[in-house]
Image (cartoon, grey):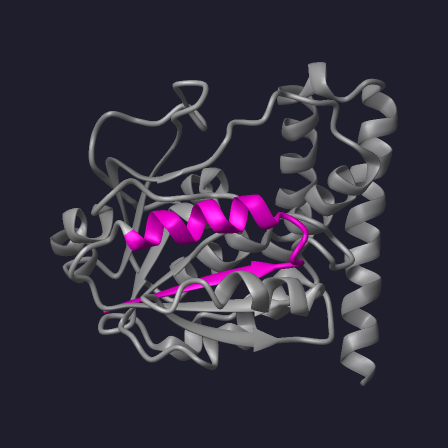
Amino acid sequence: MYSLIVPTLGKKQNELVRLLDSLLEQKNVNLEIIIAVQDNHKSVEKIIASYSDLNIVLLNLNRRGLSYARNEALKCVTQKIITFSDDDCWYPADIFNEIHDIVINNAISTFNIYDPIKNKFYKNYSKNKKNYTSVYTALKVSSIEIFINTNLIDKNQIDFDTLFGLGAIFPSGEENTLLLDLLKNNNEITYVPVIAVYHEKKDNILLGEKNLEAKGAFFARNFNYVLSLFLSLAFISKKYKLLGKPSSGLKSILKGRNMYYLEKKKLAKK
């Protein structure tokens, strides 16, 4: 029923063990775990050897990149419900059974992330179930919240832009770009206020130059020129306290926009 895609560099070994332990707590579920290993292959193989009770597909890759790894793992999927895990998240016991009726009746389902260590939600979530009808609602979704039903969506539509995501030119925005692409293809996203996955909540930190460049590139990739510029300015205004020097932040976002347009030109020439 479920294909769980887990990209890893093999560095967070304790966290990977925690993830796999939590998957042992998913009773009577047809669960396929595709682990896309981009580095430290032997270390990951050693960990996986202790989990013979889990259906694990090991995919050893010789190239880094979160979106690339997910796309390669998507080629190995055999189950109908696809979800994307991080190697440092983990799952509530029996959650895959609990959300079964939700995910089989919706094209795309998104849920809540919760930090049981700090007893905090990962972000501010609505308490009400709703359908996402605007592309802007997809901007707030994290990849590990997403469950996609390939009975209702053509699997070929599920494709991450490899310019985005950790290890790529632009180190964020890959999941939001995916959802925007799916929305543009008239797929519906349903949000349900259920805790489906655990992840430690990060403290707010100043936004670095690379992340700001990625945000600018994201706006350029997904919106027209004028709207992407407006969204860039709105982002600067909203994240003012996390920018250090707002003027430098705006320059980084605009630089990211230009970088994206240059990368698209390069790809068009190939």
Q: Work out whether 260 lies above or below 227.
A: below
Question: Which one is in front, 34 or 244?
Answer: 34
Can you give x and y, in whole percent of width and height, for residue 90 in the image? 41, 44
Q: Residue at x 30, y 26 (%)?
A: 126
Q: x, y percentage for residue 83? A: 38, 59
Q: Is residue 230 left or right of residue 119?
A: right
Q: Is residue 173 above or below residue 114?
A: below
Give the residue furthest to the left: 101
Quarter of the image where one finds residue 2:
bottom left
Q: In the picture, residue 118 is in which quadrant?
A: top left
| Left or right: 114 in relation to 247 | left
Q: Nearer the viewer, residue 24 or 230?
A: 24
Q: How many marks?
A: 0
Q: Is residue 16 above or below residue 66?
A: above
| Residue 198, placed above or below residue 115 | below
Residue 87 or 263: which is nearer the viewer? 87
Residue lying farthest bottom?
Answer: 270
Write the start and end of the magenta stretch as one range. Answer: 1-24
6 falls in the magenta region = yes
Res 135 seen here: no
Is 217 within the magenta?
no
Dividing the picture into quadrants, the one containing residue 134 is top left
Residue at screen point 50% across, 41% down: 139
Q: Residue furthest top?
A: 241
Quadrant location, the N terminus:
bottom left
Q: Residue at x 16, y 52 (%)?
A: 97
- At 37% across and 69% down in the image, what residue appears? 52
* 96 relative position to 53: left or right: left
Q: Position of residue 35 (x, y in %)?
A: 51, 67
Can the viewer see residue 115? yes
